[in-house]
Amino acid sequence: MNLYTELIALDIGTSCVKLVSIEDGPGKQGYIVKNLEMKELPAGLIGGDFTNPFISDMPVFKDILAGMVKKVKNSRQGYVIGLPDRWVKLHLNNMQLTENERKSSEFLAWRLQKSLPIPEGMPVKIDFQILSGIADQPDTFQVLAAAVNSDIIDILSRITTDLEIEVMAFDTSSLGIFNLFEEVYPEKIAEQIVVNLHVGHETTVIKAYSNGNLLYERVIEVAGEEFAKIISEIDTINLENAMRAKETEKFFPVNRADIELLVRKRQRIDRIFGNWLRELNVTFRFFQEKFNVSRLPNIFMTGGSTMFAGLDNFLSEYFETNCFLFNPLNEIPLAKKIDSKLLAKGPAFAACVGLLAK
């Protein structure tokens, strides 16, 4: 696995901020995790979407970042910062491009900005990657474009400048997860389609990849927070307690003894997860029809809200395919072991570690 050791990854989510830094092990054998931290954010501090991203209290957010950054144990070249998926619009485009046009990044950014469905007058920053040529279409290429509101980048740039954080790049958090997966399981992605199901606090992001390139993406605005809100309503408790409760309650069978218990809780489980499962089902059926896929490909799961015990086996049966939890911290060749409780949270750190993938 090839990871940047000279950079620090800082992943901004809507419920927490994560920070990861690593260095080479002795003799460049394996890696040593120098920093691995997750800081919960006050409710409503980070939110919004592509058109209206926001940080509701800048001083509070700045203090949280300052507290995390000062714990970094050694100097690095700079930071790569992951943005919430809801803040970034990804678009796959087929574009006719001459050789000179392909070499002109400014021209391509201008052309993409004109062609993307961006609200009129909205200031945006555009990044892109030319993925591959289109078969039987001369000079036509598939281009992956990412757009983000310029205002939020300007705000983050001012905060990081004040904190003397040198930002090397802003990125969309979940794209790097596939780079990690590709390093660990090259045999699973060779000439195959593979799907990443990333379930965070506010959103569930489904990304399908084919031959290493992004094929399809959908963001579902149902995830961990919504599960907790429903528990809060059912049990008449506040949202904070409901968030804690969902981490310990059993919802999916791990062994045969669990089945009888969970059958009695069927209505409760359906109320909590039913809408999410229906959205997933609609998404995957549409994907199968659009790309003429008879059976769903392997689905690897990441994000803090995929860590319900038994969820992987349940979804494997529900969607009749292989669903499994991807913990990159288990896959990194570690020259020095880390705390077992932090290690178990690897799926929640997947997007942050993915920012360091080369």
Image: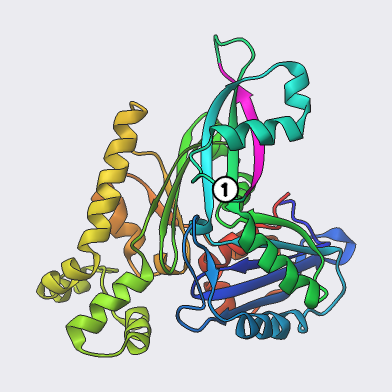
Q: Which residue: 30% across, 51% down?
A: 280
Question: Where residue 335 appears, x then y in whole percent?
Answer: 76, 68
Residue bounds of the magenta highlight: 124-134
Q: Residue furthest front?
A: 121
Q: Nearer the viewer, residue 294 or 137?
A: 137
Q: Which residue: 66% across, 61% down?
A: 153
User: Does the magenta stretch mainly form a helix, a strand or a loop?
Assistant: strand
Q: Nearer the viewer, residue 7 or 153?
A: 153
Q: Which residue: 58% across, 60% down?
A: 351
Q: Does the segment drawn in magenta span residue 131?
A: yes
User: At numbered mark 1, what does the secondary structure look like: helix, strand or loop?
Assistant: helix
Q: Does the segment drawn in magenta span residue 5?
A: no
Is any atom of residue 317 visible in this view? no
Residue beneath disc 1: 178
Residue 185 found in image quarter: top right
- Above or below, 273 relative to 145: below
Is any atom of residue 45 visible in this view? yes
**Residue 162 in the figure: left or right of residue 273:** right
